[in-house]
Every structure is written in structure tokens, then in C-alpha cells.
Image: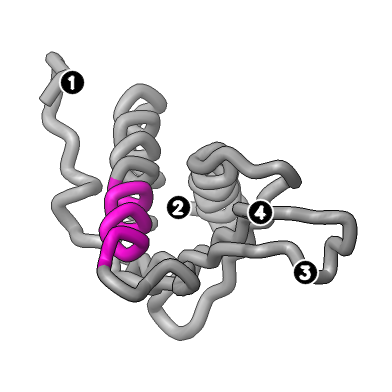
Amino acid sequence: MKTIDLSQRIEEIELALAATFESPKSPTVSAYQEGATTFLTLAWVVETGRDTTLDARCVARLKISDHQINHYATLETAKRRIVQGRLKDLLRQRVDAMRSEAGSDENCSLQFDVDDALFDVPDEPYNI
């Protein structure tokens, strides 16, 4: 796969993640590569006030291997959309679980590895 195609596929995932949570301000998504790993970082505002420097933000970092990105890049569009939906669902679940733990009201930062199974989409029908 060409480098340009891979960067386009990573950007697809970034755009999907940006729409995961409601935010009074635009969320930010960034990606960087370290060795054979791509890190996607999503940050969004959960509470804002008059002084924006005091905005309450959440940050989530997803760790995705090159193998996973390459597999994602070879999928057809419909299957990539399913993977994007799975990533968003997984992210919501992880954030909800973290925020529901006792004493974690102020904690809104997490990092996790994405499992290979998330990228396995069977042939039609896609509804699994």
C-alpha cells in the first residue's frame, strides 16, 4: 500500500473519532507514528466556561499496530465504516467505564491498545 493511501486511511479514522463525543468546542485528533505503532489521540471539551483556559477536557489515546492499519487500508469502504463504528463504540465504552469508577470524576484520560479482532469484518451480511 502506498504511503499516501495509508495516511488517507489514518485520516479517515481520525475524522470518525472526532465525531465520537458531544463537545461544546471542536475536538482535536492527531496521529503520530512511533516504530511499528500508530498512536491516535482524541481530545474533547466536556465543560467550558468564560475562561477557556479552564476548560475541562478528556483525552484518549489509541494504540494501533502497523499490521492493523495495513489490514484496515485493504478493506472496502463498507467494511472500513464498520471498523470506524467499532472504534467509536469501544472508545465510548472505555470512557464510560473509566468515568463510572468510584473516585474518577476528575479523571478523563486513558490509553489502550486496539485489539486485532476489531479489524476483522466478515463478508456480507455485515451486521454482526
Q: Which colour scheme is used?
A: one colour
- Of the image marks 1 and 4, the number of the one nearer the N terminus: 4
Q: Marks 2 and 4, Cα distance to the nearest angstrom?
A: 41 Å
Query: What secondary structure do most residues of the magenta stretch adopt?
Result: helix
Horizontal side of residue 123 vs 50, given as left or right? left
Label 3 sits on residue: 54
Label 4 sits on residue: 47
Q: What residue type is labelled 1?
A: Tyr
- Please give the name of the residue rendered at 18% of the width and 20% of the height, measured from the top-left corner: 126
Q: Marks 3 and 2, Cα distance to the nearest angstrom?
A: 43 Å
Q: Is residue 83 visible?
A: yes
Q: Which amino acid does label 3 sit on?
A: Leu
Q: Quadrant of residue 89?
A: top left
Residue at the limit of the structure toward the top, as seen here: 125
Label 1 sits on residue: 126
Q: Mark 2 packing: few (<14 Cα in 10 Å), some, or many (20+)?
A: few
